[in-house]
Amino acid sequence: MWLAAREPTTIVSADSRQVYRQFDVGTAKPTATERAAVPHRGIDVVDPTERYSAAAWAESAEGWIGEAYAAGTTPIVVGGTGLYLKALFDGLFEEPPLDCPRCPRLAAFRHELQGKYPTWNNAPVRSFGGLDAGLLIVGLAPGMKGANRTGRPFTGDYAGDLLYHSLLKFGFAVGSYAAHAADGLELRRARITNAVRCVPPQNKPETAEIGACGRFLAAELETAPRLKAILALGAIAHNAVLAAKGLKRARYPFGHGALHELPDGTALADSYHCSRLNTNTGRLTTDMFEAVIAKLTERLDADRAQPPSPTTTNGAQ
Ligand code: SF4
């Protein structure tokens, strides 16, 4: 039987399609009659061009959860975005506010860009992909005309071309990448974030800014329930992950191609950042990048019968 058919439940999701994907329990698929019998609330079509849509979802879901309790039912939050919402409501997950003041220099730069380019995102860029992903990809910071403009990590500038095409090739994404947030691309088993959520001038965040934004990266890492691997794009992202996990850099040195087994059982893989500079200079080629993704794919697919030990393999500085 379908789970929700047995219990007085209201299912809450940011995307109603997830209701049927997530609660298809056992071999039985819900019939149309069963589906109609299950109380659920959600947004059937999410407009990815809607600015700050995550906040809008959270606001809607809060109302739905209240309605569910008022109706004497137990709200269950489902789906990748649902897990994100659940974590928000459980107080486990902290997103930066859209006017985050923690980095005065970056806040001033955002305000300057808001005046110059009012149609751009110009706010902390939210992570992309479900919080239940097995792989978290961590970049440096939004590019000014990329993620800062489009509101989606690695979207709209050159760095996204290599990253998203590789994710599509290895099955971590479906759809097609068209360099804008409304291209319909969906991630599978993967989530993308940045060590620094706001665009820095000249793409160079300061040390204090990386530290200030670390709390949000730590929230990502602590909350993700199925996280098995992290891909750090560049040494700054690598070090930010270690700092968020309270680990020492000396024990886990950055190196393109390195795969570090961390004490909590997750793997930390390193790649040079897929920036235009790195690819134009030949520091990072498509083959080099895809080799890292292939290694991560193997890692994620492996049956880990033995708990991993804290070692480092196959790194190149
Ligand atoms: S970079 Fe992070 S901590 Fe700094 S202002 Fe932006 S969201 Fe806040």
Image (tube, grey):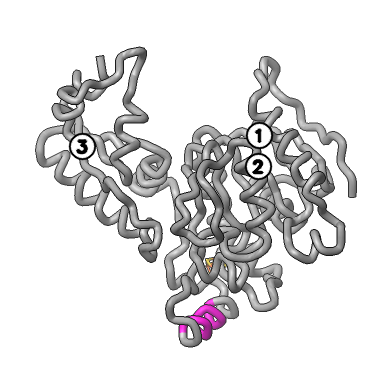
Query: According to the image, label 2 marks what residue?
Result: 230
For residue 276, above or below residue 59: below
Marks 3 and 1: which is nearer the front?
3
Real-space Cα distance between discs 3 and 1?
34 Å
Provide the secondary structure element on which disc 1 rests.
loop
Pinpoint residue 114: horizontal percent, then vertical percent.
47, 81
Q: Earlier in the sequence, mark 1 or mark 2?
A: 2
Amino acid carrying label 1: it is Thr
- The residue that appears at 67% across and 60% down in the rendered structure is 159
Graded by Cα atoms within 10 Å as few (under 14), some (14 to 19) or many (20 or more), the crowding at tag 2 reads many
- Give the image quarter of residue 168: top right
Q: Earlier in the sequence, mark 3 or mark 2?
A: 3
Residue 302 visible in this rendered orientation of the protein:
yes
Residue at far right of view: 317
* Magenta stretch encompasses residue 199: no
Marks 1 and 2: which is nearer the front?
2
Graded by Cα atoms within 10 Å as few (under 14), some (14 to 19) or many (20 or more), the crowding at tag 1 reads many
Real-space Cα distance between discs 3 and 2?
33 Å
- The residue that appears at 86% across and 63% down in the rendered structure is 281
Residue at far left of view: 71
Q: Earlier in the sequence, mark 3 or mark 1?
A: 3
Provide the secondary structure element on which disc 2 rests.
strand
The secondary structure making up most of the magenta span is helix
Query: According to the image, label 3 marks what residue?
Result: 40
Pinpoint residue 269: horizontal percent, then vertical percent.
74, 41
- Left or right of 63 in this view: 238: right
- Give the image quarter of residue 160: bottom right
Amino acid carrying label 2: it is Ile
- Left or right of 110 in this view: 261: right
The residue segment tinted magenta is 107-114
Query: According to the image, label 1 marks what residue?
Result: 266
